Amino acid sequence: MKKILALMGSPRKNKNTDKLLNKVLEGIKDSGEDVDIKKVYLKDKDIASCIACDSCGKTGKCFKNDDMDDIYSDFDEGDGVIIASPLYFNTVSSLTKIMIDRCQVYWSSKYVLKNPSIDINKKRVGMFICVGGAPYRENQFDGCTPVMDLFFKAINTSYKHNIFASHTDKTPVWEREDLMSKAYEMGKNYFK
């Protein structure tokens, strides 16, 4: 059985980002793969900000004991990681960024201590879903893709898929059959 961790980084449940993520997860469930999907709403988790204390650079672990501990385990055990975030000021939401910043532990364990705290031999597939309310413009999502690229590298995950949705303030995702169909198909083909 393959395990997928889906992290929802919007503070709003059942809105554009969440509904697009759900459509991808529906496609994954219908793909024929034997999957266990764990969906986590970051807004419901107690995740403290990274304070750049360098504890992880000395021990390979974060000294904080909060809900990130479960997410660290899910990254390590997972075969797929999906991050869904609204576009805020041309990057991911603060909920998403706080979680990403706490993954400094992986960089420190790999590059400082030379003793990775995540299974680096496990193959993982990564997807990023991002929703922007503003009208489409070229390079609209360029501020967040480098962040996601580095994040997926830190957790030893192959960054394979993006779904970007613009202009959702005017037309929500659930009214856009083409976008929802694309999300469903990307879910069905997630592991291909």
Image (cartoon, rainbow, N blue to C red):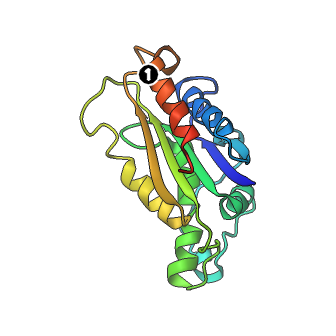
Q: x, y percentage for residue 94?
A: 51, 44
Residue drawn at x 59%, y 74% is 120
Q: x, y percentage for residue 163?
A: 44, 38
Query: Which residue is situated farthest in the bottom direction here?
Result: 114
Placement of 76 over or under 148, stated as above or below: below
Q: Which residue is mark 1?
A: 178
Helix, strand, or loop for circle 1?
helix
Q: Amino acid at mark 1?
A: Asp
In this image, 61 relative to 15: left or right?
A: right
Placement of 84 over or under 99, stated as above or below: above
Q: x, y percentage for residue 131?
A: 45, 32
Residue drawn at x 63%, y 23% is 14
Query: Which residue is situated farthest in the left direction here?
Result: 138
Query: Which residue is situated farthest in the front direction here?
Result: 32
Residue drawn at x 42%, y 54% is 147
Q: Nearer the viewer, residue 83 or 24?
A: 24
Q: Nearer the viewer, residue 5 or 133?
A: 5
In this image, 137 relative to 81: left or right?
A: left
Residue drawn at x 42%, y 57% is 149
Q: x, y percentage for residue 4?
A: 67, 50
Q: Quadrant of the N terminus?
A: bottom right
